[in-house]
Image: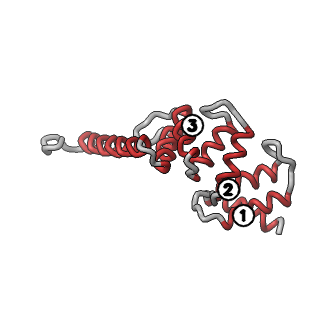
Amino acid sequence: VESGAISGSKADAWKKAMAEETRLVALRQSAEGGDAKAMAKLGAAYHYGERGVKKDATQAFLWLKRAADLKENEGLCACANFYLSGEGVEPSVSRGLAMLVMAAALGTGHACFMLGQANQHGRWGFDKSPQEATRWYREMQTCDRGDATEETREDAAAWLREHP
């Protein structure tokens, strides 16, 4: 393949797989070397079965937890989700909420959205509180992280239009 003796779609697929494997090795080395963003990316790869790794909720949680322990925003928010859902780890609402609040305090828009949802719908031990939901959705608008999806931003905006 490298010499050009073999070409076509199979050769292209092989080259693509080799390039993906090279990127995965580099990502893993960065994560193992203490890079919190790389840890979060590797955790996400295991969560979604991307970057050449098989979907594995336990491995995803372990890498996300390492990132969260280093106060990496996306790792904190994702790890909170794992604790709240029990995916890849024993469920723990208290640990999940602690991480979610920390992520929100660090400017993670998705964490603010989740806290807004918790107050809007009365989840995870929160009472239904339109005032608190509104506060968290407003806070979401001030977050400096671009991690909230278009759908979650629109949901929050719709709530705020109805609850000024």
Dot 3, how many residues are within 10 Å of its Cα: few (below 14), some (14-19), or many (20+)? Answer: many
Q: Residue at x 64, y 64 (%)?
A: 143
Indicate the amino acid at tag 2. Answer: Ala
User: How far apart, in angstroms, are the residues tagged by discs 3 and 1?
Assistant: 27 Å
Mark found first going from the N terminus, 1 or 2: 2
Residue linked to disc 2 = 104
Tell me the SS state at disc 2: helix
- x, y percentage for residue 68? 58, 45
User: How far apart, in angstroms, are the residues tagged by discs 3 and 2?
Assistant: 19 Å
- x, y percentage for residue 124? 78, 42
Residue linked to disc 1 = 139
Camera-nearest residue between 76 and 87: 76
Mark found first going from the N terminus, 3 or 2: 3
Is the C-beta separation of discs 1 and 2 under 8 Å?
A: yes
- Residue 151 can be seen, yes or no: no
Q: Residue at x 54, y 36 (%)?
A: 62
Q: Is residue 11 left or right of residue 137?
A: left
- Residue 25 can be seen, yes or no: yes
Camera-nearest residue between 9 and 48: 48
Q: Residue at x 70, y 56 (%)?
A: 112
User: How far apart, in angstroms, are the residues tagged by discs 1 and 2?
Assistant: 9 Å
- Residue 61 circle label: 3
- The C terminus lies in which quarter of the figure? bottom right
- Residue 107 circle label: none
